[in-house]
Amino acid sequence: MNAIARFQRDMRKVSAQLDKIERRVLRGGLRSALNKAGTPILSSARNGAPVRTGALKKSLRKKVWNNQRKSKAGVIVGASTKATGIVVDGVEVRPSKYLHLVEYGTAAHGKHPGTPPSGFMRRTRTEATPRARAILAKEIGPAFKKAAARLQK
């Protein structure tokens, strides 16, 4: 076997090992790191949420997602669909159904004068993203090392 063929074979092995590391990191380490990185975003959103009844502020949650096929992952911060809402005129109103109206406001319609946008989620994104990225950078390195160490065993 010539040197080029050996090199190509070795590179395929390295590529396969890197794919395994990527899958393991996505499965465990990245999920943990994203969960930690999402905490300052959630805290900032809760601190900035406008309070009328407190239901919106209580319903804010974070959710870590990953798609192993596309090698993508992330954190979603928003109102939980499972959170119970408030009763207005005998009808339960869930925060997940009106978060967008609080964030972007409403136009005047009928006798309703409309509501101004609060923009608290957008402010949260700009304020908390640097902290979240710093936490993610700090946490992801050990996750890669741990996955690589498992492959060597």
Image (tube, rainbow, N blue to C red):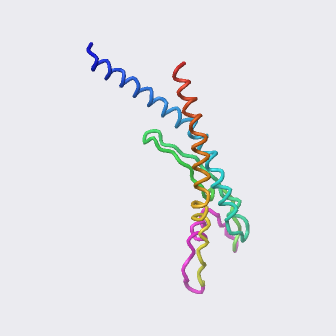
Quarter of the image for residue 88 reads bottom right
Question: Is residue 116 located in the magenta-colored stretch of the structure?
Answer: no
Front residue of 81 and 77: 77
* Residue 90 screen position, x and y as percent: 70, 71
Question: Is residue 105 located in the magenta-colored stretch of the structure?
Answer: yes
Q: Residue furthest front?
A: 3
- Using the image, determine if residue 4 lies above or below residue 47: above
In the rendered view of the protein, which quadrant contains the N terminus?
A: top left
- Using the image, determine if residue 48 lies above or below residue 6: below
- Please name the residue shown 59% across and 87% down the image: 111
- Please name the residue shown 26% across and 15% down the image: 2
Q: Residue furthest bottom?
A: 111
* Residue 112 screen position, x and y as percent: 60, 83
* Residue 144 screen position, x and y as percent: 54, 33
Q: Which residues are magenta?
A: 89-111
Q: How many marks?
A: 0
* Residue 53 screen position, x and y as percent: 73, 69
Taking the image as shown, residue 4 lies to the left or right of residue 47, namely left
Quarter of the image for residue 8 reads top left
In the rendered view of the protein, which quadrant contains the C terminus?
A: top right
Front residue of 15 and 137: 137
Quarter of the image for residue 17 reads top left
Q: Residue furthest top?
A: 1
- Using the image, determine if residue 71 lies above or below residue 124: above
